[in-house]
Amino acid sequence: MNLTITAAIHARWGHRVDGLIHTHAWTVEATVAGPADCDKVFPADDLETILREAVEPWAGHYLTHEDAGEWKGYKPLVWEREATVEETVRYLWKHIEERVPGLTEVALVEATEFDRCRTVRLSSCAQSLI
């Protein structure tokens, strides 16, 4: 049995997927697990700060694997792979895992600004901590 905490922040950035540059308001989540009897799994404020620091450099940018130049004031940040939501959640995991012991899941939610919402979750197969 584990005790978990999930922290979430909201941010906005763009990405270029299938040749289309567009922006979203995003919800970025991270879940941390600890023993069921622990006093605190992970400090929530610290987890939110780590998430904010991970995505802050993306503000005012669009993530892309091919530089298409500036778009509506957004500048490109070039990645090795296409910046799908799946690739972005993998990037976030790699960026925060060393700073977050017990990390079990990172999720990225496309905003519900329109008539749909998508969530991509990357989870570890963590064993019970007890």
Image (cartoon, rainbow, N blue to C red):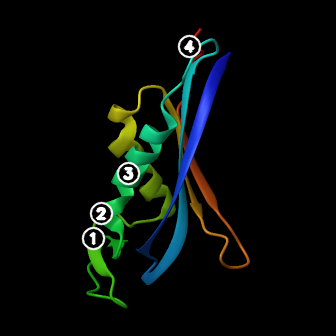
Q: Looking at the image, is mark 2 or mark 1 earlier in the sequence?
A: 2
Q: Residue at x 56, y 13 (%)?
A: 129
Question: Residue 95, how many percent across, how many down?
Answer: 33, 45
Q: Secondary structure at mark 2?
A: helix
The amino acid pointed to by label 1 is Leu
Residue 91: mark: 3
Q: As displayed, is residue 84 above or below residue 73?
A: above
Query: Is the residue marked by circle 4 packed among few (<14), some (14-19), or many (20+) residues within 10 Å?
Result: few
Q: Which residue is mark 1?
A: 77
Q: Which residue is mark 2?
A: 57
CB contact under 8 Å: marks 4 and 2: no
Residue in the foreground of this view, choosing between 47 and 67: 47
Q: Outermost residue toward the right?
A: 115
Q: As displayed, is residue 21 above or below residue 102?
A: below
Q: As displayed, is residue 35 above or below residue 82?
A: above
Q: Secondary structure at mark 3?
A: helix
Q: Looking at the image, is mark 4 or mark 2 earlier in the sequence?
A: 2
Q: Outermost residue toward the top?
A: 130
Question: Residue 77, how many percent across, how many down?
Answer: 27, 70
Q: Which residue is mark 4?
A: 129
The amino acid pointed to by label 4 is Leu
The amino acid pointed to by label 3 is Tyr
Horizontal side of 16 relative to 3 (left or right) equals: left
Q: Secondary structure at mark 4?
A: loop
Give the number of the mark in front: 2 or 1. Answer: 2
Question: Residue 22, how many percent across, how many down?
Answer: 47, 81
> Which quadrant of the rendered structure holds the C terminus?
top right
CB contact under 8 Å: marks 3 and 4: no
Query: Is the residue marked by circle 3 packed among few (<14), some (14-19), or many (20+) residues within 10 Å?
Result: some
Q: Residue at x 62, y 57 (%)?
A: 119
